[in-house]
């Protein structure tokens, strides 16, 4: 196909970025692509099939699971289990990590943490949702079952991370630590095609994204920064615009392209904020830093946090470097 580079071609081309690569990471990324295409198909016809609405189950965080959450979780697990490159997975929808038992999977060098469908509250109302994934090399010995320590690595150790946004078009954005590239799904050929090479977030932006309904529970640092965003100053193009979709992937993606800041801070009601370190914040932080932005908790760079639990939450501030630095100056 002239002029079009598909994601599969791109991944194979970039395999040479990794000395001694054996193609396993390439195959693992391809498994993720296949699962995301299947999920995309269901998301697109969600209103027609009996797949909208809630199940009767809760996840470990006490949140009612949506049918599509569970469907997406099953698709990713099946693709990775069958692929054999990952020795285990952890996901938002499963209480514990899953060690794949087959002999082939035990030989897998990688583990994957993911949020199969982020922005669940937006599923039933036809607003963008996403998938987030994070890949690490295992720490346990190849040939054995995956262990918890494999899943509790610092974000700095990630070998790849990405997200899929099921929006007005479907896109997959990922990094392997050599920049960020974005691919748009062409439904006519069923392929993700390179549409956003070398994505960089602008250093400055004019958008802030935060659930301001929580403001009464926020620290003075957050209150004062949001007040700053609303002040009039023509030189710094304030007041900024408030944009909050409530799907992290969609808010993040818009800010990546236009410049902006996304904030889900600690509050007196949720002392560590809402978002989960291992499958929401670390992968997005890796992408954000690779695109020239900053990902912070307010007191610490997100990717330097040593995780202690699979579903741990962290305050989250991500976006254009000058905007994040300005907010940090209020802490
Ligand atoms: P989820 O994984 O259960 O969908 O929750 C994560 C989502 C994020 O996508 C979004 O940024 C946030 O929750 C919105 O939370 P709130 O409704 O509190 O503003
Ligand atoms: Mg989520």
Image (cartoon, grey):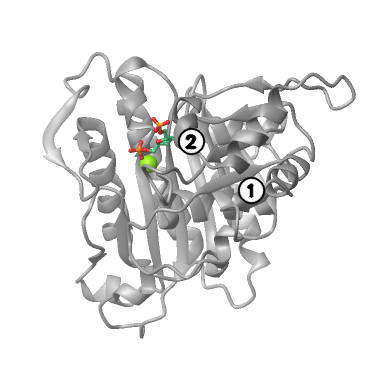
Quadrant field for ligand 1: top left
- SS assignment at label 1: helix
Left or right: residue 311 versus residue 67 is right
- Which of the 4 image quadrants contains residue 40? top left
* Mark 2 Cα shell of 10 Å, populated few (<14), some (14-19), many (≥20): many
Dot placed on the residue nearer the N-terminal end, 1 or 2: 2
- SS assignment at label 2: helix
* Mark 1 Cα shell of 10 Å, populated few (<14), some (14-19), many (≥20): many
Depicted 137 relative to depicted 328: above or below: below
Question: Residue 243: percent from the left, percent from the top?
Answer: 58, 22
Q: Nearer the viewer, residue 13 or 270?
A: 270
Location of mark 1 (residue): 288
Label 2 CB sits under 8 Å from any ligand 1 atom: yes
- Which of the 4 image quadrants contains residue 125? top left
Question: Residue 45: percent from the left, percent from the top?
Answer: 30, 19
Q: Nearer the viewer, residue 291 or 81?
A: 291
Location of mark 2 (residue): 248
Mark 1–mark 2 distance (CA, rounded to whole Å):
13 Å
Q: Nearer the viewer, residue 106 or 7?
A: 106
Furthest residue to the right? 235
């Amino acid at each position: 196909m002239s002029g079009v580079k598909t994601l599969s071609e791109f991944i194979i081309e970039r395999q040479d970025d990794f000395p001694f690569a054996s193609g396993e990471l390439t195959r693992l990324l391809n498994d993720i692509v296949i699962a995301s295409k299947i999920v995309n198909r269901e998301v697109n016809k969600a209103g027609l099939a009996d797949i909208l609405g809630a199940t009767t189950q809760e996840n470990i965080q006490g949140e009612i699971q949506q049918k599509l959450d569970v469907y997406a979780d099953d698709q990713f697990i099946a693709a990775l289990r069958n692929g054999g490159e990952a020795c285990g997975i952890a996901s938002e929808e499963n209480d514990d990590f899953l060690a794949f038992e087959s002999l082939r999977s035990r030989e897998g060098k990688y583990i994957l943490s993911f949020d199969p469908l982020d922005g669940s509250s937006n599923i039933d109302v036809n607003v963008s949702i996403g998938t987030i994934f994070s890949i690490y090399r295992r720490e346990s010995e190849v040939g054995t079952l995956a262990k918890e320590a494999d899943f509790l690595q610092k974000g700095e150790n990630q070998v790849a991370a990405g997200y899929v946004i099921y929006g007005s078009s479907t896109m997959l954005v990922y990094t392997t630590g050599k920049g960020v590239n974005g691919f748009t799904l062409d439904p006519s050929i069923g392929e993700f095609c390179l549409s956003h090479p070398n994505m960089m977030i602008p250093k400055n932006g004019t958008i802030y994204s935060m659930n301001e309904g929580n403001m009464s529970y926020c620290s003075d640092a957050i209150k004062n920064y949001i007040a700053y965003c609303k002040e009039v100053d023509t030189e710094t193009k304030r007041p900024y615009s408030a944009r909050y979709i409530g799907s992290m992937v969609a808010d993040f993606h818009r800010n990546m392209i236009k410049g902006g800041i996304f904030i889900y801070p600690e509050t007196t009601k949720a002392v560590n904020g809402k978002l989960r370190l291992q499958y929401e914040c670390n992968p997005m932080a890796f992408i954000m830093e690779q695109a020239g932005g900053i990902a912070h908790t307010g007191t610490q760079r997100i990717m330097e946090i040593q995780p202690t639990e699979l579903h741990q939450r962290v305050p989250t501030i991500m976006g254009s470097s000058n905007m994040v630095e300005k907010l940090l100056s209020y802490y």
